[in-house]
Image (tube, rainbow, N blue to C red):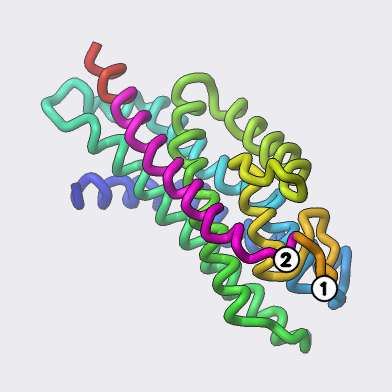
């Protein structure tokens, strides 16, 4: 399995995916500086990040990975005796690691730029928020890998943006916050004190309830494991027909 994973990372060396790891966080930080200045720097940066930039970057990373493999017919590996499940799992794990990396990079860039412009950065909350975003977005990796493989990469990217920006923002502040696409925005409210619409969270607002954090993480981690298992089996049986 380690060799499969090494192979997947080697394939990324000359692809746009690795650039997206840096470009996404830089775009989010640039947008908040240009549009909001120093006021609400942390809240604005996170809001841009989890509502638009991160979903877009993640869906492109996943879609570009799948489309490249499809373009090269999985490099002819299906014609030899290999464990086809491991091919899918290695791509899934690699994309999961890339998701973790881009969230860590966002935290580092946010902290560095914020400190540089004289903004007070709640480092612990920002780190926890970045880790929670990783955990609550990870389930989308097997989901959109399947969509990209089954339909098309462009459709997968558009669907991701529609669901994350539409359903995510719409349901996050309602009783239906547990809709998977809405969970990241809902959990950010008690962690970084920002509402799904980007406004600061006032004291006493029901969105500040921290009990949703554990529940949201459990739901999304369970979805990640479930979708990973289902899509791995689908990929295996699909390719051996």
* Viewer-side residue, 8 vs 44: 44
**Is residue 32 left or right of 191 when viewed as pictured?**
right
Magenta span: chief secondary structure? helix
Q: For the point 44% across and 49% down, which residue is it?
A: 221
Relative to 209, is 221 above or below?
A: above
Q: What stretch of residues is rendered in magenta?
A: 207-234
| Number of numbered labels in the structure image | 2
**Is residue 225 left or right of 201 when viewed as pictured?**
left
In what element is the residue under mark 1? loop
Work out whether mark 1 precedes mark 2 in sequence or the reverse, and give the earlier one: 1
Q: Is residue 220 magenta?
A: yes
- Looking at the image, which residue sits at the far top? 241
Q: For the point 87% across and 76% down, which residue is it?
A: 39
Residue 93 in sight: yes
How far is the residue under mark 1 from the one under mark 2?
8 Å
Q: Quadrant of residue 82?
A: top left
The residue that disc 2 covers is: 208
**Tag 1–tag 2 contact (CB < 8 Å):** yes
- What is the x, y in percent for residue 234? 33, 23
**Is residue 88 left or right of 142 when viewed as pictured?**
left
- What is the x, y in percent for residue 126? 62, 74
Q: Quadrant of residue 192?
A: bottom right
The residue that disc 1 covers is: 203
Q: Is residue 2 magenta?
A: no
């Amino acid at each position: 399995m380690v060799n499969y994973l090494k192979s997947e990372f080697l394939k990324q060396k000359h692809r746009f995916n690795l650039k997206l790891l840096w470009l996404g966080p830089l775009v989010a930080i640039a947008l908040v500086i240009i549009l909001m200045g120093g006021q609400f720097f942390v809240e604005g940066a996170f809001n841009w990040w989890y509502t638009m930039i991160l979903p877009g970057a993640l869906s492109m990373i996943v879609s570009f990975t799948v489309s490249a493999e499809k373009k090269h017919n999985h490099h002819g590996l299906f014609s030899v005796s290999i464990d086809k499940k491991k091919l899918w799992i290695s791509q899934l794990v690699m994309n999961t690691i890339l998701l973790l990396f881009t969230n860590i990079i966002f935290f580092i860039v946010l902290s560095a730029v914020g400190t540089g412009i004289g903004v007070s950065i709640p480092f612990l909350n920002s780190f926890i928020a970045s880790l929670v975003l990783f955990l609550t977005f990870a389930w989308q990796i097997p989901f959109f890998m399947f969509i990209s493989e089954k339909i098309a990469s462009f459709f997968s990217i558009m669907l991701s943006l529609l669901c994350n920006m539409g359903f995510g923002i719409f349901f996050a502040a309602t009783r239906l916050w547990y809709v998977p696409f809405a969970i990241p925005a809902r959990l950010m409210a008690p962690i970084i004190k920002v509402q799904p619409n980007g406004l600061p969270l006032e004291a006493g607002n029901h969105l500040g309830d921290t009990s949703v954090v554990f529940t949201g993480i459990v739901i999304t981690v369970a979805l990640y494991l479930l979708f990973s298992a289902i899509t791995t089996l689908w990929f295996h049986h699909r390719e051996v027909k």
